[in-house]
Amino acid sequence: METPQHHPLDAAIALEPAGEHRYRGSTSADYANMVGPFGGVIAATLLNAALTHPQRLGDPLSLTVHYAAPIADGDYDISARPMRTNRNTQHWLIELLQGDGVAAFATAVFANRRDTWGATETPFPEVPPPDAVAVAPTHPRAAWTRRYQMRFITGALGEADADREPDSLTQVWMRDDPPRPLDYAALASLCDAFFPRIFVRRPSWVPVGTVALTTYFHADAAQLAAQGTQPVLGAARAGRFGNGFFDQSAEVWSSDGQLLAVSHQVVYFKE
Amino acid sequence: METPQHHPLDAAIALEPAGEHRYRGSTSADYANMVGPFGGVIAATLLNAALTHPQRLGDPLSLTVHYAAPIADGDYDISARPMRTNRNTQHWLIELLQGDGVAAFATAVFANRRDTWGATETPFPEVPPPDAVAVAPTHPRAAWTRRYQMRFITGALGEADADREPDSLTQVWMRDDPPRPLDYAALASLCDAFFPRIFVRRPSWVPVGTVALTTYFHADAAQLAAQGTQPVLGAARAGRFGNGFFDQSAEVWSSDGQLLAVSHQVVYFKE
């Protein structure tokens, strides 16, 4: 196991301070997508700007990322500033700047968590354990897929023609590859590691791109620490496809069935 | 039926231009909550700033609202500016300013929709028609509930002790009261008209407040026009409660079973 400092994810999301509320970073070949960087690592990078900001309060509660324009491989600037700081919550605006424009931006809520009554209504899926599921091949044209080990229980790419319900449900055990202890940045990235649902639903390839993504973090720091490098269970499905867009929702569960995060995104598709 | 111009919702979300990217508005007693304004109308107002902006492109696709601080009854300023305008999508940042701070802010995506393949995976619930369901009483301490006619099929307030599954599912036919033709602003508000799930799940009252909310609009302008003033079907449920927060998700369906919008929010609760 590589230590976090030397893991490719940490290199990819690393930021250099560049003045008040400002950082510099650059895209990582390890997490390249077919065109530009993998969106999950962009989400993790934007979150990381707030995580490393000296005015940060508490831990991430929500993160919304807007993929506003194509992100070019290379350097970028980040502006991260607290929009409002309350006693136990803090709201952020974080912008990724390239050239003279905003290529992506995020809003986030950080919060102090307290011990309260709790209950989970979303059912933990009945699935075989990770060791009982084969590791899927990575995607030859998307380098970032080599940075995740995925074991699909259902809804892998290329199953669209198979004898299954006409839906886009995926259930998958997944972890960073090489293994890396789970933290908020890694979880933010994992929440975008589900392939666009249209590829699960339909066999043909079409241009797609996430337009905006929102993740709610349920896990507290102790749950993340307990998870360590074990695989998480992901489940993703679509709501509605139409008019050139669709929405998809995902849950990420700890290896012992705790709901760590839920994530929703709206995706553009062309046909 | 009142015309949109004279409907209380239109008065509540009305904005006066106040310079480039700037507007002025004020809270409405018609949509008061127990403390401050009803969050749904704040969401509709923030969206309305982009809807009425001279640089707007297309129609709403997504809206994320951060309720960053208590909003006082009275006047507010709004700053609305396009962060990035592409050929068919436009990303917005919209801020509600009171005193010297940001009380709420939103990001949004507007888009040109195109006719494409479509499919809905979320099942339309089997429910009785609106006329077969009794109209619920409004809440005496929340004026805004008088501006919605609600017919609960399941999961009304006060059912927490009843003989039902231990979940927080609500199914409800609802419409503006008085009736008003559905549009994006009204739909944005309706998406926040589901009571906090903790009140459906547990009988005791606790302080709560939406922290952040994201709505994806599936409906195009023609679907909204076809819906008119008929009641929409809403369904809402919780994901996980814990550590002082919970997430809830909702769908809003047209009277003939089309998925008009989905909405997700993270809510603070105290106990």
Image (spheres, coloured by chain):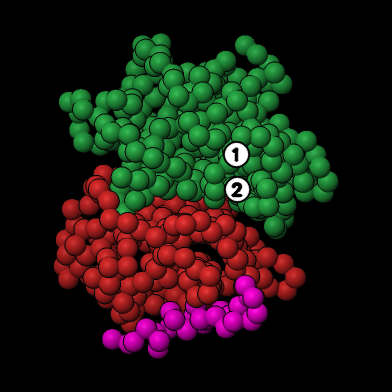
Chain colours: A green, B red
Q: CA distance from mark 1 to mark 2?
A: 9 Å
> To which residue does mark 1 refer?
A72
Q: Is residue A123 above or below residue B164?
A: above
Question: At 43% from the left edge and 36% from the top edge, which residue is drawn?
Answer: A251
Rendered-image quadrant of the N terminus of chain B: bottom left
- The kind of residue tagged 1 is Ala
- Pointer 1 chain: A
Q: Is residue B26 magenta?
A: yes
Dot 2 falls on a residue whose secondary structure is strand
Mark whose residue sits in front, 1 or 2: 1
Label placed on residue A103: 2
Residue at the farthest right position: A19
Q: Is residue B103 above or below residue B177?
A: above
Question: At 44% from the left edge and 75% from the top edge, which residue is drawn?
Answer: B144
Q: Is residue B165 above or below residue B176?
A: above
Question: At 53% from the left edge and 74% from the top edge, which residue is drawn?
Answer: B54
- Which class describes the residues within 10 Å of circle 2: few (<14), some (14-19), or many (20+)? many
Residue A165 image position (x, y, % from top left): 20, 33
- Would you say residue A1 is visible in this rendering? yes
Kindly check if marks 1 and 2 are in contact, taking CB atoms under 8 A apart as contact.
yes
Nearer to us in this view, B57 or A114: B57
Q: Splitting the image into 4 quarters, where does residue A28 fall?
A: top right
- The kind of residue tagged 2 is Ala
Looking at the image, is mark 1 or mark 2 earlier in the sequence?
1
* A254 relative position to B163: left or right: right
Nearer to us in this view, B95 or A147: A147
